[in-house]
Image: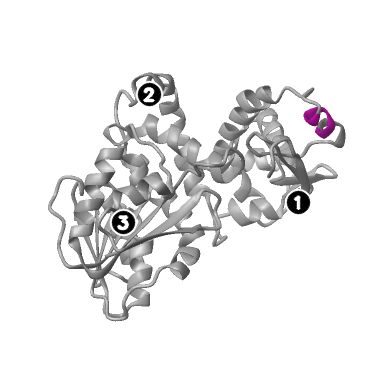
């Protein structure tokens, strides 16, 4: 969008206001829209106070079962309070906040879910993101030392050094929620040789992509390499999907071990943002050396747009970068940087996905 232009459009009775700044999603009045356009609405207060408090409240609502309490019926606040073991005052504030945010509808003293909440926040929905939202809750404590990470370029401790068993579970199942959003879009863009035999999934966590590749290519077997604490939950997911005979799990740090050779395909999904530039260069060169002639490396990550300064496609990778800096000393990168790491490959191409800011890169030997 050209600089200086503003655009507003309505969806689910919510105005999405797109300026030179990030997207603000909230039910606001026409008068408030005018104030915003005239720079009379103090948007930093919304960003630094309202958005932060509501984000925290939303994670609590998910964990305490507010949306599940309304999944199949309308209820008054007292009934939701009893179902969630929250105070009536707290429940009313939480419900009304979710009304303004567009997740809950209210009428005649009763509350019900909107289509937005039914799609994303109810467990029986195929698009359920509750595990991912609950994983975000584990980030809040660590955001307390974000200033240290900004100053020093790395956190006091890497996230996995203080993860509990429950944190690992939320991480694996949260990443699975995210992968389910992208899986069909990703698989439409991936193409392996019909008789492909071997796939290596580095940092594969939940294993959804490796399992889907095995389903689509009958001769294919996959190996997932990740931390042992994560693979404890991956083992459960792989077993539930009946893929034990096709998917092997290897507990190791893939940046340190020798990678198995003669791979038809290697997946690096949501990995590069956790490593420094030089570490990614070395890792990708090691990966390329494991591929057969004609083998493919696929990189999925939140890539920055070097020439853009607006929109979710730029905002989300930057927020991921800040979070990963604080989690592990990581960063987000551009396609141009990824392409430079792949020196020696035959072809490198970028494929944007429908989730803003997420990109799939195909590298062919």
Whether residue 129 is visible: yes
Whether residue 169 is visible: no
Asked whether disc 1 touches disc 3, contact meaning CB atoms under 8 Å apart, the reply is no
Tag 3 residue: 234
Tag 1 residue: 11
Q: Position of residue 62 (x, y in %)?
A: 56, 43
What is the number of the mark on residue 149? Answer: 2
Q: Position of residue 138 (x, y in %)?
A: 43, 35
Classify 156 as above or below 268. Answer: above
Q: Residue at x 64, y 55 (%)?
A: 118
What is the number of the mark on residue 322? Answer: none
Asked whether, in this view, residue 334 is left or right of residue 24, the answer is left
Q: CA distance from mark 3 to mark 2?
A: 30 Å
Asked whether disc 3 touches disc 2, contact meaning CB atoms under 8 Å apart, the reply is no
Q: Residue at x 67, y 27 (%)?
A: 46
* Mark closer to the chain start, 3 or 2: 2
Residue 34 falls within the magenta-colored stretch: yes
The boundaries of the magenta stretch are 33-37
Q: Residue at x 86, y 37 (%)?
A: 30
Classify 207 as above or below 46. Answer: below
* Mark closer to the chain start, 1 or 3: 1
Q: Main secondary structure of the magenta part?
A: helix
* Mark closer to the chain start, 1 or 2: 1
Asked whether, in this view, residue 212 is left or right of residue 60, the answer is left
Q: Position of residue 232 (x, y in %)?
A: 27, 52
Q: Residue at x 62, y 47 (%)?
A: 67
């Amino acid at each position: 969008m050209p600089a200086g232009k503003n655009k507003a459009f309505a969806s689910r009775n919510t105005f999405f206001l797109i300026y030179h700044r990030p997207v603000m999603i909230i039910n606001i009045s026409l008068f408030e829209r005018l104030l915003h356009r005239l720079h009379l609405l103090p948007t930093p207060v919304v960003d630094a106070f309202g958005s932060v408090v509501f984000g925290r409240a939303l994670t609590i609502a998910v964990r305490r079962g507010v949306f599940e309490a309304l999944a199949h019926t309308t209820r008054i606040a007292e009934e939701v309070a009893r179902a969630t073991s929250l105070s009536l005052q707290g429940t009313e504030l939480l419900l009304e906040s979710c009304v303004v945010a567009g997740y809950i509808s209210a009428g005649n003293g009763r509350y019900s879910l909107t289509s937005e909440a039914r799609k994303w926040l109810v467990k029986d929905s195929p698009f359920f993101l509750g595990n991912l939202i609950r994983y975000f809750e584990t980030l809040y404590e660590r955001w307390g030392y974000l200033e240290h990470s900004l100053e020093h370029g790395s956190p006091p401790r890497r996230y996995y050094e203080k993860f509990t068993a429950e944190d690992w579970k939320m991480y694996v199942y949260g990443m699975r929620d995210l992968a389910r959003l992208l899986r069909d879009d990703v698989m439409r863009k991936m193409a392996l040789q019909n008789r492909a035999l071997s796939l290596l999934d580095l940092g594969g966590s939940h294993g959804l992509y490796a399992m889907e590749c095995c389903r689509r290519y009958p001769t294919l077997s996959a190996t997932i390499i990740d931390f042992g604490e994560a693979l404890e939950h991956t083992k459960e997911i792989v077993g539930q999907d009946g893929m034990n005979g096709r998917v092997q799990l290897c507990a190791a740090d893939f940046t340190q071990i020798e990678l198995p050779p003669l791979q038809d395909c290697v997946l690096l999904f949501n990995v590069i943002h956790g490593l420094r530039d030089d570490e990614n260069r070395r890792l990708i060169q090691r990966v390329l050396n494991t591929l057969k002639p004609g083998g493919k490396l696929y990189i999925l990550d939140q890539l920055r747009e070097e020439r853009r300064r607006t929109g979710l496609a730029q905002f989300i990778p930057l927020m991921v970068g800040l979070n990963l800096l604080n989690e592990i000393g990581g960063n987000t990168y551009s396609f141009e940087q990824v392409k430079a790491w792949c020196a020696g490959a035959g072809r490198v191409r970028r494929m944007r996905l429908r989730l803003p800011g997420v990109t799939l890169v195909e590298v062919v030997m």
